[in-house]
Amino acid sequence: MRILIVEDEQHLAEALSQILKKNHYSVDMVHDGEAGLDYALSGIYDLLLLDIMLPGMDGIEILKSVRSEGMGVPIILLTAKGETPDKIAGLDHGADDYVAKPFSADELLARIRAAMRRKGEVMPEDALKFGDLELNATNPKLTVRGKELKLIPKESELLELLIVRKQAVTSKEQMIEKLWGFDSEAEHNNVEVYISFLRKKLNFLGSTTRITTIRGIGYVLEEGQAQ
C-alpha cells in the first residue's frame, strides 16, 4: 500500500514517513501544494495524508482538484488545533477524515485503517489469500498449507499487488509506479529480479499458484500445478 504525505514541515513529514515505513507502508513525501497535486493526480497512491496549510496551494484546493477529477482515493487531512472551519470545509469537499496536530502514531495508523476499510480496501496487516497462498504483509511472511517463509519488503509488496489485482494482468510499469514511485529510476529488470525471487519461493513452498508472464503485457497470478 502506497501513501503520499503532503506536509511542509519537513521534520514532521520525515517522522510520519518513518512511522509508516515501520508499519510496512510505501511512502512518498512532498512539501508544497503544487507538487502535492501533481503527485496526487498520478493515481498511484492508495491514501493521501494532506496538510491544510501549505505553500503555493493549500490542502483544501488540492482536495477539491483531486475530487473534481473523480478520484476516490482516501484523503486524511492534517490540521492544527482550532481549525474547525477548515475541517468542515475539508469534509464537505470529500475528505475522509482529519487528524488534529499533535497526534499519536497509534491514532494516525488507526485512522488510516478506518479510511481504507470505508473504501473497501484490504489492509496490509490482514491476511491476503489467493489459491493456496496466504500473505501476511505486516511481518511479512508467506504461508502455503502451513509452511511459512519470510519475505523481504519488496517481495511482499509485489505479491500483495498481484493478489489484490487477482486475475488482472499487471504491467511492469504499474509495478514500478506502485512499488518505487512514478518518478523512480527503477527499471524493468528491477521487477524481473523480484518476480524471480518470488517464483523461487513459491517453488520452495510447493505452491500450486504460479506467476505467469503475459508476453509484452505483464504478469498475473494463476492457480495450477506445483512449479
Image: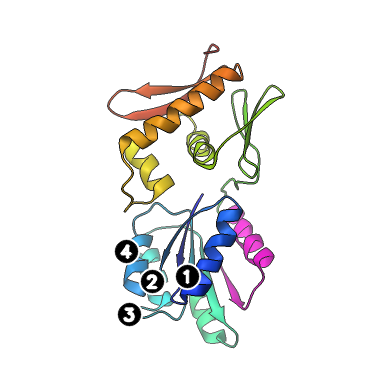
Q: Which is more foreground, mark 2 or mark 1?
A: 1
Q: Is residue 191 left or right of residue 78?
A: left
Name the residue rendered at 57%, 85% in the picture.
84
Q: Quadrant of residue 176?
A: top left
Rounded to the nearest angstrom, the CA distance separating label 2 from label 1 is 8 Å
Q: Which residue is mark 1?
A: 50
Q: Is residue 158 left or right of residue 103?
A: left
Q: Position of residue 201 (x, y in %)?
A: 55, 24
Q: Earlier in the sequence, mark 2 or mark 4?
A: 4
Rounded to the nearest angstrom, the CA distance separating label 3 from label 1 is 14 Å
Q: Which residues are magenta?
A: 91-118
Q: Which is more foreground, mark 2 or mark 4?
A: 4
In this view, the residue farthest toward the bottom is 82
Q: Which residue is mark 3?
A: 56
Residue 102 magenta-highlighted: yes
Q: Position of residue 157 (x, y in %)?
A: 51, 41
**Could one spot residue 37 in this view of the protein?**
yes
The amino acid type found where label 2 is placed reads Ile
* Helix, strand or loop for disc 2: helix
The amino acid type found where label 1 is placed reads Leu
**Looking at the image, do the residues carrying marks 2 and 1 touch, with CB atoms under 8 Å apart?**
yes
Q: Which residue is mark 4?
A: 38
